[in-house]
Amino acid sequence: MKVGDLVQYKVDNLSTAFFNTRMAIRNSDKKEKARPVVVGIIVDFETNYDRFGDPIERVAVVNWGSVISEEPDYMELLEVISNC
């Protein structure tokens, strides 16, 4: 992953509760829930450090367009769909 890549959430790893709280789901059928395809672009990376200055984790800052503005997301939850 690098700045400028188009990404989306890995749907198989996320629960329905995650999508219910984060994004609107339209229930066209009571048995199946249509999951939205939301595409974002990586605009930056943030590294979190512990008190000794050692890096703990690195997260991608993703711009989700009109649904959600820029927010940090764990890279394990994202999949690249287009490289820049």
Image (tube, rainbow, N blue to C red):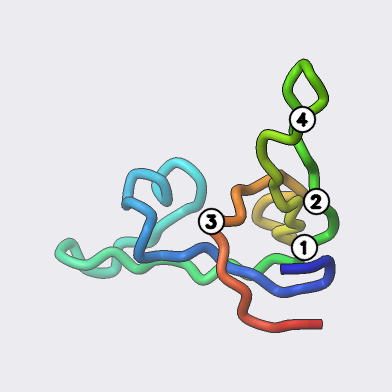
Q: Is residue 72 left or right of residue 52?
A: left
Upstream in sequence: badge 2 or badge 4: 2
Q: Which mark is residue 45?
A: 2
Count of all numbered marks drawn on residues in the image: 4
Mark 3 and mark 2: Cα distance apart in space:
14 Å
Q: Nearer the viewer, mark 2 or mark 4?
A: 4
Mark 2 and mark 4: Cα distance apart in space:
16 Å
Q: Position of residue 8 (x, y in %)?
A: 58, 68
Residue 74 sits above or below residue 34 on the image: above
Query: Which residue position holds label 1?
Result: 42
User: Which residue type does callout 3 highlight?
Assistant: Glu
User: Which residue type does callout 4 highlight?
Assistant: Asp
Residue 25 falls in image quadrant: bottom left
SS for tag 4? loop
Q: Position of residue 42 (x, y in %)?
A: 77, 62
SS for tag 3? helix
Q: Are marks 4 and 1 in contact (CB under 8 Å)?
A: no
Query: Which residue position holds label 3?
Result: 76
Q: Which mark is residue 54?
A: 4
Residue 19 sits above or below residue 5 on the image: above
Residue at 70%, 45% (x, y): give it.
58
